[in-house]
Image: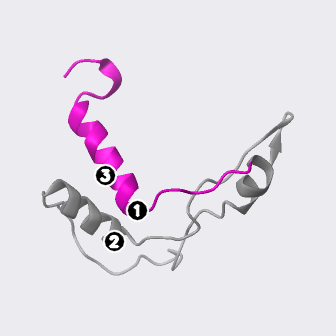
Amino acid sequence: MKFNGSESFNIGTGRGHSVREVIEMVERISGKTVPRIDSDRRPGDPPAVFADSRRAQEVLKWKPRFGLEEIVRSSFNWHEAHPNGYTGKK
């Protein structure tokens, strides 16, 4: 997709993860329980959604290098080190 001479790309691993899989990974890495309410899929929700990054791979020569565990671990570690976000204050 082009916008005023620029292009946009989907960036992802090409493999989707369920909300449950993400929550379970966060719990495993953080050692904390994530509050949740389990329920059925809402009417109209697609059965699966994931980023198709083939265009980014072709044009940018980009390849996904990290899976769900590495992504969650990196995010968790950053938030632990920066509890107030980008304010620079701990």
Kindly identify the residue that appears in the image at 67 percent across and 60 percent down.
Answer: 53
- For label 2, the crowd category at 10 Å Cα-Cα, with few meaning under 14, some 14 to 19 and many 20 or more, is few
Q: Disc 2 versus disc 1: distance between alpha carbons? A: 9 Å
- Image label count: 3
Mark 1 or 3, nearer chain start: 1
Q: Please name the amino acid that badge 1 sits on.
A: Leu
Q: Which of marks 2 and 1 is in front?
A: 1
Residue 79, labelled with which disc? none
Q: Are marks 2 and 1 in contact (CB under 8 Å)?
A: yes
* Residue type at the position of mark 3: Arg
Q: In this view, does 1 lie above or below 80?
A: below
Name the residue: 25% across, 68% down: 24
Query: Dot 3 corresponds to which residue?
Result: 73
Bounds of the magenta segment: 61-90
Determine whether 74 is above or below 34 in the image.
above
Asked if residue 73 lies left or right of residue 9, the reply is left
Is residue 31 on the magenta stretch? no
Determine if the magenta segment contains residue 73: yes
**Image quarter of the C terminus:** top left
Where residue 13 sits: x, y (%)? Answer: 55, 63
Tag 3's secondary structure? helix
In this rendering, is residue 52 above or below 4? below
User: What residue would you read off at disc 2?
Assistant: 21
The CA span between labels 1 and 3 is 8 Å
- Amino acid type shown at disc 2: Glu
Instruction: Decide which of tag 2 and tag 3 comes sooner along the chain.
Output: 2
